[in-house]
Structures are given as C-alpha cells and as structure tokens.
Image (cartoon, grey):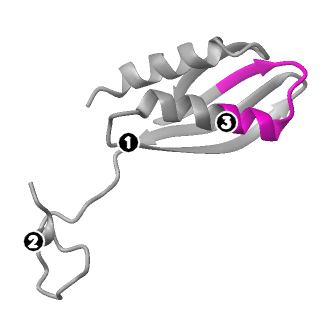
Amino acid sequence: MDLDIIWSDFIARLAEVDKIDHASWKRVAGIPFLYISAKDIHKEELTLTIRKCAAKSMKGKRLHSETIPVRSNGYLYVFRHRFYVPQMKMFCCGNLCIDCIRFNER
C-alpha cells in the first residue's frame, strides 16, 4: 500500500479546514512529522480535526493512525503523526487463542 497517496489526501483535507492556514509533513530520521500553522484554534480542537481528517483519508483501507503532539510555538504546531497497518497473526501457534488465524474466514 502506497502511503504517499494517503498522506497527500490527508494534507489536502487539512488544508480545506477554515482555521488551518498551512499544513505540511516532512520525514525526519524516518519519522513523519506534521507541521500545522493555525490561528484561533485550541490544541484539543486541532487534534480532533487531525483525527477526523485522518479517518476520512483512511476510509476503506486497513490502516490506523497515531498522533502525538511534539511542540507548539505561537501559531505553529508540530505533531508526530503516522499511518500504520495493524499487525495480525499470520500462523497458528497451537495455544487455542481467541483470535487464531484458523477462525478467520477468507
């Protein structure tokens, strides 16, 4: 799955929000950081907006997202944000687990 398509859709959705002036992301040392410039918005409202835009971008795909605030300086907010594929069991270990791969219907 190409996450660059998900990221571009996510950034486009963030740019459409009225209270957000600018949104971009950059990968530093392999970790994706989200940079948002916004005025007249609380941090809680901004994180809720990020979660909603991420959910809309991930719709129909088996992805999860994680957003961790890093710092804020005036109107600039920096978050560590990542999209990831959830890990699933790939084999039966023989311990009769509830989420055993044998019980999955494909």
- In reply to whether residue 44 is colored magenta, the answer given is yes
Image height of 54 relative to 84, above or below: above
Q: CA distance from mark 3 to mark 2?
A: 39 Å
Residue at x 57%, y 17% (from the top left corner): 13
Residue position for label 2: 102
Instruction: Tell me which amino acid carries mark 2.
Output: Arg
Image height of 102 relative to 33, above or below: below
Mark earlier in primary sequence (3, 1): 1
Tell me if residue 29 can be seen: no
Instruction: Tell me which amino acid carries mark 3.
Output: Phe
Q: Which sits in the foreground, 34 or 40? A: 40
Q: What numbered label is drawn on residue 79? A: 3
Q: Secondary structure at mark 1?
A: loop
Percent coordinates x, y for residue 81 in the rendering: 57, 38
Residue position for label 1: 63
Mark 3 crowdedness (10 Å alpha carbons): few <14, some 14-19, many ≥20: many
Tell me if residue 7 can be seen: yes
Q: Secondary structure at mark 2?
A: helix
Mark 2 crowdedness (10 Å alpha carbons): few <14, some 14-19, many ≥20: few
Q: Which sits in the foreground, 105 or 34? A: 105
Left or right of 83 in this view: 93: left
Q: Which residues are magenta?
A: 35-49
Q: Which sits in the foreground, 20 or 26? A: 20
Count every numbered label the image shows and give the total: 3
Q: CA distance from mark 2 to mark 1?
A: 23 Å
Mark earlier in primary sequence (3, 2): 3
Left or right of 90 in this view: 2: right
Quadrant showing the N terminus: top left
